[in-house]
Amino acid sequence: MDKKTLTKGARTRTALINAALQCFAESGYHGASMRLIAERAGLKAVGGIYNHFYGKEEIFTEVVRTHHPVNQLAPALADSDGVTLEALFRDAARRMAAQLGADNGMALVKLMFIELVEFDGKHIAQLFESLFPHVMRFMQRISLQQDELRKAPPPVIMRAFIGSIYAFFLTELLLAGTPMTTTGDLDDLMDVFLHGALKAET
């Protein structure tokens, strides 16, 4: 929806969600006060929050629903393209990396950890139902070229693939400027994922 067509209430709600993301990233879930969120969103009084959310956990739930990287990663998987299975995986990796590397990268990393540490990942489970069709589309495309894969359950292959991209993104942020991130790129990661770390037997 175009920003100009949003109602005043919808604009305020969006401002609160975006402000809360930054507050949670800076101060953690418990350190982010409702007053600070209200101030960051441009509200004159903290009571204005309660016109849109009943409390902080509902705000956090909406932040996860709106901003958690998995929201963008699942559609990126579904939109991937490639004639061969290798090309499909490489395109999916590029699309996922582009989503993860967008603005607010470190804030999103912190959001993921807050979700895991403070809420045991319960919000991701709630998101999964709506995102699963995107993942299934990608898995179905993989299964059409099953003969190119080693024998392993498709869900395991998916977890290994998605986990590799997440780990690459996280270490890129957390180890920035160290020797661990000054060499190698996403293509190198995909070479290891697709062909293994060990030399082929001769």
Image (cartoon, rainbow, N blue to C red):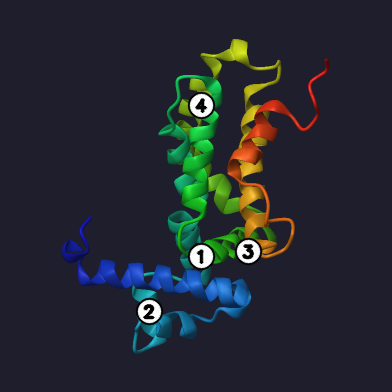
Residue 130 percent across, percent down from the top left:
45, 40
Q: Which is closer to the viewer, label 3 or label 1?
A: 3
Please say whether residue 33 is visible from this viewpoint: yes
Q: Is residue 35 above or below residue 190?
A: below
Q: Residue at x 41, y 68 (%)?
A: 17
Q: Which is closer to the viewer, label 4 or label 1?
A: 4
- Amino acid carrying mark 2 in the image: Ala
Evaluate if marks 3 and 1 touch, with contact meaning CB atoms under 8 Å apart.
yes
Q: Residue at x 65, y 49 (%)?
A: 168
Residue 41's tag is: 2
Residue 122 percent across, percent down from the top left:
60, 52
Can you identify the residue that label 3 sits on? 114
Residue 99 percent across, percent down from the top left:
47, 50
Can you identify the residue that label 4 sits on? 87
Q: Is residue 143 above or below residue 125?
A: above
Evaluate if marks 3 and 4 touch, with contact meaning CB atoms under 8 Å apart.
no
Can you identify the residue that label 1 sits on? 60
Around disc 1, counting alpha carbons within 10 Å, would you say few (fewer than 14), some (14 to 19), or many (20 or more)? many
Left or right for 192, reference 115 = right
Q: Which is closer to the viewer, label 2 or label 4?
A: 4
Between the C-alphas of marks 2 and 4, the distance is 43 Å
Most distant residue in the top direction = 147
The numbered mark, 2 or 4, whose residue comes first in the sequence reads 2
The numbered mark, 3 or 4, whose residue comes first in the sequence reads 4
Between the C-alphas of marks 3 and 1, the distance is 10 Å
- Amino acid carrying mark 1 in the image: Phe
Quadrant where the C terminus is found in the figure: top right
- Amino acid carrying mark 3 in the image: Ile
Between the C-alphas of marks 4 and 1, the distance is 37 Å
The numbered mark, 4 or 1, whose residue comes first in the sequence reads 1
